[in-house]
Image: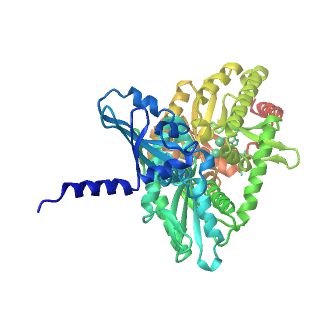
Amino acid sequence: MQPDPSDAYEALVQFLYRAPIGLAQIAPDGTVDMLNPMASSLLMPIAQNGGLDNLFEVLAPIAPQLPRLAGEFGEPSGVICEGMRAPLPLEHTAHGNPQVLAISLMKLDGERLMAVINDATIEVQREQETLLRRLRNAARTDALTRMPNREAVREQLQHLVNRPLSAGEFAVLFMNCDRFRQINDTLGQAAGDELLVQIADRIRGALRPPSDRINAASGTGQLAARVGGDEFVVVLDGMRNRDDAERVAGRILDALARPYRVLGHEVVCGTSLGLAWGAESARDADQILRDAGIAMVEAKRAGGARHQVFETAMRERAERRADIEAELRQALAEEQLFVVYQPVVGLLADGGTDYAAGVEALVRWRHPVRGIVPPIEFIGIAEECGLIGALGDFVLERSCRDFMDWQARLGSAAPRLIAVNLSRAQLGQPGWIDSVRRVLQVTGMPAGQLQLEVTESLAAQDQGIQLRLHELKALGIQLALDDFGTGYSSLSSLHLLPVDTVKIDRSFVSQSDTSAHHRVLIEATVKVAQSLGMKTVAEGIETQSQADVVRAQFCAKGQGYFYSRPLVSDDLLAWLASHEAIAA
Ligand code: C2E
Ligand code: CA
Ligand code: CA
């Protein structure tokens, strides 16, 4: 049996009539021909005088552009606009009422248009929520590494802090790259960014996935985050015992210690890690992060590339360091720093001593309360807080000025060489070579009589440092390897370093007259240095017998309390005068 076409028509009309969307058939000028009930219920609240005769007039307050759009539409039929959002005026948006309508308009033919009107409130709300969630995530995510950021860590830590102690301990690992600034400065910011991305990947790789979630309630999870320039944090929850957390710390450090390939350069960068226990630290997310950060600084001070577990005594030390930092700034501004000079004497083959061979410049701090402060108490802090540049510039310029002053006053009896210590942070500073050049220029210091001292560990580092050292050599400046024997480069790699002089560390010299082992080491060092055309200086000679031993090993120069302690400029001149008299 054929279906009755009038039945089908009736079904269609019923469908359109009951459809949960508003449908209206209108004339090109907006006059309404037909409306379904949903359309009237959506439109009624905004109809100005209760009439729904003309759709364009009804919608004018929220979609005034409709008549124009319809008028401009030149095609015989088609979509004029689709899903146009029209927010309703506030007075209509009581709870439960539609807040936004979506309007579509279609041209059926020359006579008729079809309007589809929807309540888009829920749809719009959902879109807004998604957008907000994305914004919130973006505000909690580090754009470079895609890791959670400091805000996200603080939030999650606060959950852990707030839960009862019985729920178990958690560990906070705070990591900082030991040489990031230097790499960033020498290879450029793009390389620095790339390195950070690789560090983040390695940290994630060293954890078992997922590495971005803590579930405070179930006491499980790990979170790896970037909380600052080159600072990363890992939160470990649900550790069975403390050894486990230290093992994870070790695993991360191992992963980070492997060389990186960054924009064509091989880069080695150790990481210092501080570990704080959640249950032990103050009950506050910021305090725990601070504690872990303090332990990280201690790890760095202990030489870097290691981890250190937080202890409360560290807090006091950190405060003291912060005090010193503030005072050091003031010291630089108020010229509380000064330079003393320790004579370096020539050990002549005929048994004589050349007292005017040279001096080493050593910085001192005349503290208004504590008196004279030795450099070991503030050089490290100056390096950490970025004051080393200004400090080093001051020492270099002061030394060169004094040296030129001695030349003017003593002529040929003046020291012939002045040695100035360099710290790694100085070598890494962009533009530093230019400031050395400037100091030579303004003081008139001959480059050949200036010796800059670098430590083994520094000189043996990456290509960037090597490049800087060669630039210094190109200026005519001499280079010395300080504290030789204590660092990690050995005699066999001495030839790789662009130095003229090797300074044998005090720890060898001080045992030279009592330990055959140390004597042999000194002898070997002198021989290898000689074969490479380098001079040797024995540091820290305190006794006649030590002086005799190093002289017998053909060490060219000596330095130490046996000859003189470091002296202020005037005392140095007096010392030189008295020895000149003896030597003459
Ligand atoms: P250093 O370069 O190895 O300097 C030698 C240190 O040994 C000096 O200590 C010196 O006073 C001390 N010394 C010299 N002879 C003897 C001796 O016979 N016996 C003993 N026990 N010690 C002796 P100081 O002046 O305290 O300097 C310590 C370190 O601080 C220096 O070690 C150097 O690494 C650093 N330093 C000093 N001045 C500066 C500076 O201007 N810039 C930088 N970057 N570092 C500096
Ligand atoms: Ca030195
Ligand atoms: Ca030394």
Q: Nearer the viewer, residue 24 or 458?
A: 24
Q: Quadrant of the C terminus?
A: top right
Q: Seen in the image, is 414 located left or right of residue 134?
A: right
Q: Quadrant of the N terminus?
A: bottom left
Visual colour scheme: rainbow
163 vs 509: above or below: below
* Direction right: furthest residue: 369
Residue 122 percent coordinates (x, y): 49, 55
Q: Quadrant of residue 440?
A: top right
Residue 82 percent coordinates (x, y): 39, 40
Residue 492 percent coordinates (x, y): 44, 47
The reply to whether residue 330 is visible in this rendering is yes
370 vs 387: above or below: below
Residue 581 percent coordinates (x, y): 79, 31
Residue at the image position 73 percent from the left and 43 percent from the top = 563
Q: Nearer the viewer, residue 450 or 202?
A: 202
Q: Quadrant of residue 449?
A: top right
Q: Quadrant of residue 292?
A: bottom right
Residue at the image position 31 percent from the left and 35 percent from the top = 78
Question: Looking at the image, in which quadrant does ligand 3 appear?
Answer: top right
Q: Seen in the image, is 410 located left or right of residue 205?
A: right
455 vs 397: above or below: below
Q: Nearer the viewer, residue 114 or 168?
A: 114
Looking at the rendered structure, the number of numbered marks drawn on it comes to 0
* Direction bottom: furthest residue: 166
The reply to whether residue 309 is visible in this rendering is no
357 vs 488: above or below: above
Q: Nearer the viewer, residue 489 or 13?
A: 13
